[in-house]
C-alpha cells in the first residue's frame, strides 16, 4: 500500500462527510491509481462508505431530519439494483472507464447551485423512484453509494430542506453500499472481503477519523459552498487522472 493512500482516504472522507456523502467514488479512484486489483477495489470502497455514512445517518435520525417514508422508498427501490450491479461481471478496462466518467459527472454535480427549498415539491418528485433504480445499479457496479448523483435530483424536485435532502442521501448511500457489497461478495467470494480488508484496516481508521472531522469542519469552520468546491475539484481531478491512465 502506498504511504500516501491513507492520507488520501482521510482527506476524501473529511470533504465528502462535510457535504453529506460517503466518498466511495473517490476511494475507488485512489485505489485504482495506487494499483489495487480491481476485483477487491469496490469491496474496500463500499466498506469505507458504510463506515462514513452510518454516523451521518444516526445523527440525522437523532435530529429527526430523516423523511423516513420517502427516503426508505428510494433506498429500497435502489437496493436490489445495487445488489445486481455488484453481481455483474465487468472487465477491468470497462470498470475503470465507468468509474472515471462517474467521478467527473459527480464533480460537476457538486458544482450545481443549491438553494434552500421553497414552496411545494415539484411534480417531478414522483419520478424519483424511477431515477433511484439506475443509480442503485451504478452504485453496486463500480463501488459507490450513488448519493452524489441523487442529491442534485432531490434539489431539482424540491424534495425538502437541505438537511432533509442530506439525510435522505445518507440513508440511500448506506443501504446501497451494503447491498452492493453483498453483491460483490457473492460474485467474487467471501474470501475477497478478508483479502480486501487485510491491509485495509488503516484505510477504515482513516475514514472514521476523517468523517468525524468533516462533520466538525462543516458545522464550525468552512461554509458548505467552499467545501463542495474543494470536493468537486478532488473528484474531477481523480476522475481525469483515472481516464488518462
Image: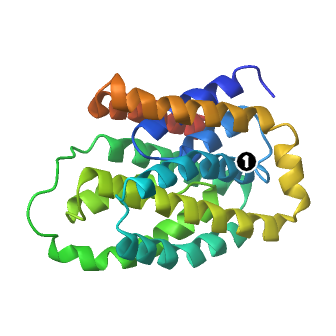
| Residue 52 seen by the camera | yes
Q: In this view, does 205 lie to the left or right of 9?
A: right
For label 1, the residue is 44
Circle count? 1
Q: Is residue 230 shown left or right of residue 185? A: left
Residue 240 point in image, percent of width and height = 50, 35
- Residue sitting at x 42%, y 47%: 106
Q: Which residue is drawn at 65% across and 68% down?
A: 179
Residue 146 in sight here:
no
Q: Is mark 1 on a helix, strand or loop?
A: helix
Residue nearer the viewer, 77 or 93 = 77
The residue lying toward the viewer, choosing from 165 and 123, is 165
Q: Is residue 135 above or below residue 212?
A: below
Q: In which quarter of the image is the C terminus?
A: top right
Placement of 115 over or under 88, stated as above or below: above
Image vertical order of residue 124 relative to residue 20, above or below:
below
Q: In the drawing, does residue 2 fall left or right of residue 226?
A: right
Expressed as whole percent of the image width and height from the top left, the position of residue 91 reads 73, 59
Image coordinates of residue 211 in percent, x first then y, are 54, 36
- Between 64 and 244, the one lying in front of the other is 64
The image quarter in which residue 197 lies: top right
> Which image quarter is the N terminus in?
top right
Q: How crowded is mark 1: few (under 14 residues within 10 Å), some or many (20 or more)?
A: many
User: For the point 79% across and 54% down, which residue is it?
Assistant: 39
Q: How does the figure colour the protein chain or chains?
A: rainbow
In the displayed image of the protein, which residue is found farthest to the left? 119
Residue beneath the point at 39% across and 61% down: 168
Give percent across and percent down for residue 105: 41, 48
Amino acid at each position: 500500500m502506498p504511504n500516501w493512500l491513507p492520507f488520501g482516504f482521510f482527506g476524501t472522507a473529511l470533504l465528502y462527510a462535510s457535504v453529506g456523502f460517503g466518498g466511495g467514488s473517490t476511494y475507488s479512484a485512489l485505489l485504482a491509481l495506487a494499483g489495487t486489483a480491481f476485483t477487491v477495489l469496490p469491496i474496500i470502497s463500499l466498506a469505507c462508505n458504510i463506515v462514513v455514512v452510518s454516523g451521518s445517518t444516526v445523527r440525522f435520525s437523532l435530529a429527526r431530519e430523516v423523511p423516513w417514508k420517502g427516503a426508505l422508498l428510494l433506498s429500497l427501490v435502489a437496493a436490489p439494483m445495487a445488489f445486481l450491479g455488484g453481481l455483474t461481471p465487468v472487465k477491468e478496462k470497462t470498470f475503470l472507464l465507468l468509474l472515471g466518467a462517474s467521478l467527473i459527472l459527480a464533480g460537476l454535480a457538486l458544482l450545481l447551485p443549491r438553494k434552500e427549498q421553497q414552496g411545494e415539491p415539484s411534480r417531478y418528485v414522483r419520478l424519483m423512484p424511477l431515477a433511484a433504480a439506475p443509480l442503485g445499479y451504478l452504485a453496486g457496479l463500480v463501488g459507490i453509494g450513488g448519493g452524489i448523483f441523487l442529491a442534485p435530483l432531490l434539489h431539482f424536485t424540491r424534495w425538502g430542506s437541505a438537511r432533509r435532502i442530506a439525510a435522505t442521501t445518507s440513508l440511500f448511500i448506506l443501504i446501497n453500499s451494503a447491498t452492493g457489497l453483498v453483491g460483490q461478495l457473492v460474485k467474487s467470494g467471501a474470501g475477497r472481503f478478508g483479502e480486501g480488508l487485510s491491509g485495509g484496516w488503516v484505510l477504515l481508521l482513516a475514514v472514521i477519523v476523517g468523517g468525524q472531522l468533516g462533520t466538525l469542519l462543516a458545522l464550525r469552520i468552512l461554509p458548505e459552498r467552499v467545501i463542495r468546491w474543494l470536493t468537486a475539484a478532488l473528484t474531477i481531478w481523480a476522475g481525469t487522472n483515472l481516464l488518462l491512465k
